[in-house]
């Protein structure tokens, strides 16, 4: 079962990802939107049938996205590993 802290971190990442997708859509960055959506779309399924190794899969995907798009609005790995947000 997923820990509450991990769930909050992943929900925060999903929230930030949707914010970034909206911003990217205004600039018509379809390729980057598609790649970010590919990273984010598996997270709810992982959360629903949680296994601890999913965290490493998510981290690897987020790191790959950040490496490919270093100027992205958010460093999602920092939100995964950094201080837990109090709210969205």
Image (cartoon, rainbow, N blue to C red):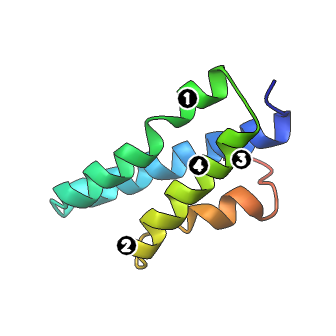
Estimate the spatial distance between the alpha carbons at disc 1 and disc 3, rounded to whole Å. Answer: 12 Å
Q: Residue at x 79, y 30 (%)?
A: 2
Estimate the spatial distance between the alpha carbons at disc 2 and disc 1, rounded to whole Å. Answer: 23 Å
The tag on residue 61 is: none
- What residue is disc 4 on? 58
Estimate the spatial distance between the alpha carbons at disc 2 and disc 4, rounded to whole Å. Answer: 15 Å
Q: Quadrant of residue 51?
A: top right
In the foreground, 13 or 23:
13
Label 1 environment density (alpha carbons within 10 Å; few <14, some 14–19, many ≥20): some
**Mark in the foreground, 1 or 3:** 1
Does residue 3 lie above or below 61 as drawn? above
Estimate the spatial distance between the alpha carbons at disc 1 and disc 4, rounded to whole Å. Answer: 11 Å
- What residue is disc 2 on? 68
**First-in-chain label (1 vs 4):** 1
In the foreground, 51 or 20:
51
Q: Residue at x 22, y 54 (%)?
A: 25
Left or right side of 37 for 40: right
- What residue is disc 1 on? 44
Left or right side of 45 for 41: left
**First-in-chain label (1 vs 3):** 3
In the foreground, 69 or 28:
69
**First-in-chain label (3 vs 4):** 3
**Mark in the foreground, 1 or 4:** 4
- What residue is disc 3 on? 9
Q: Quadrant of residue 30?
A: bottom left
Disc 4 secondary structure class: helix
Label 2 environment density (alpha carbons within 10 Å; few <14, some 14–19, many ≥20): few
Disc 2 secondary structure class: helix
Label 3 environment density (alpha carbons within 10 Å; few <14, some 14–19, many ≥20): many
Disc 1 secondary structure class: helix
Left or right side of 23 for 56: right
Instruction: Give the image location of residue 17, x and y in percent.
Output: 46, 50
């Amino acid at each position: 079962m997923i820990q509450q802290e991990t769930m909050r971190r992943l929900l925060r990442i999903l929230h930030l990802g949707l914010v970034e997708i909206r911003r990217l859509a205004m600039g018509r960055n379809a390729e980057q939107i598609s790649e970010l959506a590919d990273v984010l779309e598996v997270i709810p399924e992982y959360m629903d049938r949680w296994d601890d190794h999913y965290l490493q899969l998510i981290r690897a995907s987020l790191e790959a996205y950040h490496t490919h798009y270093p100027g992205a609005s958010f460093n999602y790995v920092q939100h995964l590993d950094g201080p837990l947000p109090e709210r969205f």
